[in-house]
Amino acid sequence: MIAFLSANKLASLIRRKKIGSVELLDFYLDRVARLNPKVNAVVVLDEKRAREQAHKADRAATKGEWKGPLHGVPMTVKESFDLEGHPTTWGRVDMKGNIAKRHALAVQRLMDAGAVVFGKTNVPALLADWQTFNPVYGTTNNPWDVSRGPGGSSGGAAAALAAGLTGLELGSDIGASIRNPAHYCGVFGHKPTFKLCPIAGHNLPPNLAVKDMLVIGPMARSADDLEISLKLISQPDELEARGVKIALARPKPDVKKLKIAVLTNAATAEVDDSVQAAVLAAAKAFAKRGAKVSETARPDFDLHEAHRTFIHLLRGATSSALNDEQFARQRELAGNAKPGDDSYVNWMMHANTMPVREWHAWDEKREQIRRAWGEFFREWDLLLCPAAATAAFPHNQKGERWERMVMVNGKPQPSTTQMFWAGFPGMAFLPSTVAPAGFTKEGLPVGVQIVGPQYGDLATIAAAQFLEREFQSFVAPKGFE
C-alpha cells in the first residue's frame, strides 16, 4: 500500500510521474484526518504552506527539474523542531506562545532536498519520558495497541510512521528518544554520532548551546531512507563549515567480512526474554550469511559503572530545565541522601546539582570508556544489543518515571532502569541504528540496536539495510492498512 512505502520509493513514484506531489499530500492529509484520532500522533498541521510546496514540486517535475532525493515527498517532524510560523512548545503550556521565526536548520535542509513538510508530531513534556503525553497536545497511542505508548520522546514520530500518516520523520535523541520509539513501533531510527548533525532550531529559547549527548536524526519505514536523510542533515553548519568537512567511513561491502558482537542482557538492566530472542535472531541472520558473530566479545569496561556515568552526565545535561525552586529542592534532597545509596533517584538528584568540578570527573570516566570502545572497534565492526528491556508497555502516567514499573520476565522493573540501553552507546557519542527484529507472542514489534564506532554511522545503517533485505522489514499494524 502506498501509505507504507519508503520515502525513497515515494520519491521514485513522483520522478516516474506515477503520482503527483499534491496528490500524495492529499492522500496523507486524508489519512491523518481519518486515522490520526486513533493515535494522536500528528498534532500540528501546516497544510497551506505544504500545499504551496507540493504545487511547486509538481510544476518543477513537468519541466524535469528536481530539487533533490526527496522531491515532493510529504513528511512531518518532531514538535521540538522549529517550523516557521508555528509554536515550538516541547509539550509545555507556558511555551505555546513560542512561535518559530524560521525553520530549524535540519528541517530547511530536508525542504531544500524537496521534502514537503506538512506538520509536526507529538512529544512528552520537555522531551523527558519514554511515553508521549503532555498538557498541550495530550496522549499519543501506539498503533500496534492503542492501550500502550509509542515510546518517547520521538513517540509521535514513530507512531505516525507506523500508522502510515507520513512519508518520513525527523527526531532527536539523548536517552534513546529516537531508538526507543522505533523499537516500540516497529520502524527504523538512527541516532547519529554526537555533533554530526547540527541541531540549530531544536532549542527552547534563549538556549543556543548543544546539550551534552543530544543529537538529531532520521526515522523512517526503511533503512535506505535513514541513509538518504542522514546525508542531507549531517553537513556542518555555517560556522563550522569554514574548517570542517564530513567524510564518514564507508561500511564493509561484504557481510562475510563483518565481525559482530552480541549483548542481549545485563545485570544492571535485565531484558525480557522476548527482546533477547529477537536480538539473537538478528545476529543469526548475519551469521547465516557468513559474518563472524560472538556472544562473549565485550568492550573493556564495567557495565554498571558505565551506567552510573551515563546517568550522571545525562542528568547533568538536563539539569538546566530545573527552575530555581526545583534546583534548591533537589540540592536539599541530594544532601540528605543515605551514604552508599546506589539508586537512580539518588544519582539523579546528585547529578542535577553537582558542582562543575565533579562533572569533569564524570567526563573523565566517560573518556576512558569512550577509548575502551575505540579499542573494541579495532577488532569488531558492530555490536548488537536491545534498545529497551521490553516491548511497548501499557500507558502509565501516574507518579514519577522511576516509580512506574514495566514487567520484565514477570517481575516489575522501574522504567528508568532500562535507560542502561540508551546510555550504553550514547554516553560515548557512538552512532546506533534501530531496525525491526520481529514480534513478541502478543504481536508487539521488537527492534535491535546496532552500535558502531564513532563516525561509523553508515556502517550501522548498512547493517540495518541488510536486516531489512534478509531478515525483517517494516510491517504495517492492523487497522491502518
Image (cartoon, grey):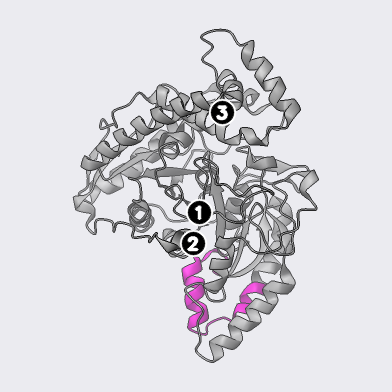
Circle 1 SS class: strand
**Labels 1 & 2 near each other (Cβ < 8 A):** yes
Question: Would you place residue 13 above or below residue 345 in this image?
Answer: below
Which of the 4 image quadrants contains residue 306? top left
Which of discs 1 and 2 lies nearer the camera? The answer is 2
| First to last magenta residue range | 2-25
Crowd class of label 2 (few under 14; some 14 to 19; many from 20; radius 10 Å): many
Camera-side residue: 212 or 132? 212
Which of discs 3 and 1 lies nearer the camera? The answer is 1
Camera-side residue: 335 or 244? 244
Q: Is residue 7 magenta?
A: yes
Camera-side residue: 38 or 427? 427
Q: Quadrant of the C terminus?
A: bottom right
Amino acid at circle 3: Thr
Amino acid at circle 1: Gly
Whichever of labels 3 and 1 marks the residue nearer the N terminus, that label is 1
Q: Residue at left 50%, top 52%?
A: 187
Camera-side residue: 279 or 455? 455
Instruction: Give the image location of residue 195, x and y in percent.
Output: 46, 50
Asked if residue 399 can be seen in this view, the reply is no
**Labels 3 & 1 near each other (Cβ < 8 A):** no
Whichever of labels 1 and 2 marks the residue nearer the N terminus, that label is 1
Q: Is residue 5 left or right of residue 100?
A: left
Checking the image for residue 416, the label placed there is: 3
Q: Residue at left 47%, top 63%?
A: 229
Instruction: Give the image location of residue 68, x and y in percent.
Output: 48, 76
Residue hosting label 2: 233
Whichever of labels 3 and 2 marks the residue nearer the N terminus, that label is 2
Checking the image for residue 217, the label placed there is: 1
Which of discs 3 and 2 lies nearer the camera? The answer is 2
Give the residue at the far bottom of this rendering. Answer: 63
